[in-house]
Image (spheres, rainbow, N blue to C red):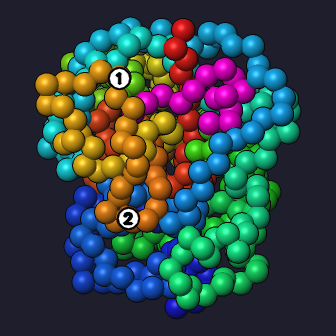
Amino acid sequence: MKAKTILISSLTILIAGCKHKNENSNKVYIEAGIARPLKKVALCCESRIPARFVGMTISVEPVLHNSPAAANHDHMVWIPAGTYLMGADNKQALPDEYPKHKVHVDGFWMDITEVTNAAFAKFVKATGYVTTAEKKPDWNVLKKQLPPGTPKPADSLLVAASLVFVPSKKPVSLDDYSQWWAWKKGASWKHPHGPGSNIVGKGNYPVVHISYFDAVAYCKWAGKRLPTEAEWEWAARGGLTNNIYPWGNENVNTGKPKANTWEGSFPYKNTLKDHFYGLAPVASFAANGYGLYDMAGNVWEWCADYYDYRYYGKLNPQGVSNPKGPAVSFDPDEPNAQKRVVRGGSFLCNESYCTGYRVARRMKTTEDSGMEHLGFRCVQNQ
Ligand SMILES: [Ca+2]
């Protein structure tokens, strides 16, 4: 196994583009230099999206040396309090979406769009903040989080970098995410597709390559916070009851485009029915019933909660109020990795295998993950 493949395998995992069922369960993959059986769902969307460093569990509260911006409700909408049934709505639901359970959430303010490049640039200008993707990984730190004996990758790979989407030229096995994700030196929020790309003229596009730490730092500065998973799903439903998508139940591919997704055959053929191959400017599609844009598709959005695939089953079946997620994360596919929930799907999600744009769809990734299709939006209590 080439060093680069080992690194990508150890740095990344899968995505937003994968089948519901992996038919090649007898294959193995290399993670951190160790061959492991490929589980039936191990490399599907439902299991995980790429992580920057597998098993790296850094819990670092961001420290800001500048005063926060004055809190206001500009560009936000009030989401009313309510009680709903959280979780699975249809047969595409994954095991971690069960059981469907009663949840009450208090009212809150929510950004009507994903945080944009323009907004993030203001934050960086005010604070001098440097994102995770812009920092060189420290091998002495990294190796402590990996299995003993994991070989050190080449110095040329231990650089400030992030994961960018590179389509294949033909159909490929959806088991091998390294065929469409590339560890690209210099990729960051300012260079979404690596050196040579930039965000000039794209102030109204969602900021991407944002780690959980980056998102929390921005929210703090803005006088806001990340939504809980329960708040996010309640808001995404937009006042509808037990519907599959933010717009209702009409299939994503039926009628006029309703979200920025991947149409065609992943990861090599995109029919562009929704007119966007990659990212779309925020609010390019109709808002949901609460006035929120892009709660489906465009970019995955960070939530505050740790991820535990068993979490719903541990809650009081009579109902819960303002749940804040489990005390610790647990993903059976990567039991040592500390993961947070991400929601909403991205421009890479496709009806045939990912369906990340369903309002009940859960996804998770390690806190240091930064990718070309991962962003966030904020909420506020009052
Ligand atoms: Ca699209």
For label 1, the residue is 322
Front position in the image: 310 or 236: 310
Magenta stretch in the rendered image? 216-229
Quarter of the rendering containing residue 225: top right
Say which amino acid is labelled 1.
Asn
Residue 335, numbered circle = 2
Q: CA distance from mark 2 to mark 1?
A: 26 Å
Q: Secondary structure at mark 2?
A: loop
Q: What is the number of callouts on the image?
A: 2
Front position in the image: 13 or 104: 104
Residue 278 magenta: no
Residue 223 magenta: yes
Residue 341, numbered circle = none
As displayed, is residue 88 above or below residue 26? above
Quarter of the rendering containing residue 336: bottom left
Image point (22%, 64%), residue name: 21
Say which amino acid is labelled 2.
Pro
